Every structure is written in C-alpha cells, then in structure tokens.
Image: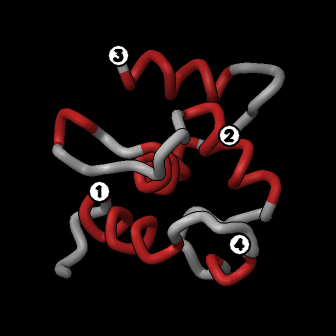
Amino acid sequence: DKNNWFMYLCDSEKYRIAPEYLPLILSIAGDQSDNIPGIKGYGFKKAVELIKLYDLRYDLSNIEKITSKVDVKLIERNYKLVSFEVI
C-alpha cells in the first residue's frame, strides 16, 4: 500500500525524503487508486532517485532542471491533480 511505501521512503537510511515530497512522488510514480498515470517505468523508489538526481523542490519550482526524456508536462499535470490545484 502506498502509505507504507511512503513511510519507508521517509524513514529509510537510503532514501530520506521529507513528507512534503509526497505529491511530487505521486506525480512521477502515479497513483492507480486515483487514476493518475505515472511516468512509464517509474515507481516510488525511482521517483525519489529522479528527485535527488535533479535536486527537485517539492513544489516544482525548479522542474526545468530535468534534462532527461522524462515527460515533464505529465509530472506538472499530475502534480496539479494530487495537490488539488485547479487545472
């Protein structure tokens, strides 16, 4: 279940991700229960790796740092959905 995974990511010595990153993680990994598609091939762990690789901020204010072929538009759209912003 996603809550257990997220607690693991927050508490894990390896990942150490702050709770305010949950919307960004869900924006990248997706959330099937809310019908939010994620980036193909990305789960919670890989989403955290992407966040750390590009030193992304939890509020997407520096999303332009992503230089890989990741679908930034999908991440931005998903972020609005999971953080209850109006699209």
Q: Nearer the viewer, mark 4 or mark 3?
A: 4
Q: Secondary structure at mark 2?
A: loop
Colour scheme employed for the rendering of this structure: secondary structure
Q: Which mark is residue 1?
A: 3
Q: Secondary structure at mark 3?
A: loop
- Which is more N-terminal, label 4 or label 1? 4
Q: From the image, tell me which residue sits under label 2.
A: 17
Q: Are marks 2 and 4 in contact (CB under 8 Å)?
A: no
Q: Is residue 35 rendered to the left or right of residue 80?
A: left
In space, the residues marked 1 and 4 are separated at their CA atoms by 20 Å
- Which is more N-terminal, label 1 or label 2? 2
Going 68% across and 40% down the picture, which residue do you hit? 17
- Which is more N-terminal, label 3 or label 2? 3
Q: Nearer the viewer, mark 1 or mark 4?
A: 4
Rendered-image quadrant of the C terminus: bottom left
Q: Secondary structure at mark 1?
A: helix
Q: Nearer the viewer, mark 2 or mark 3?
A: 3
- Which is more N-terminal, label 4 or label 2? 2
Q: Are marks 2 and 1 in contact (CB under 8 Å)?
A: no
Q: Amino acid at mark 2?
A: Ile
Q: Amino acid at mark 4?
A: Ile
In space, the residues marked 2 and 3 are separated at their CA atoms by 18 Å
Q: Amino acid at mark 1?
A: Val
Q: From the image, tell me which residue sits under label 4.
A: 66
Q: Secondary structure at mark 4?
A: loop
- Which is more N-terminal, label 3 or label 4? 3
Q: From the image, tell me which residue sits under label 1.
A: 82
In space, the residues marked 2 and 1 are separated at their CA atoms by 18 Å
Relative depth, front residue between 55 and 65: 65
Residue 21, image x and y in percent? 55, 51
Rendered-image quadrant of the N terminus: top left
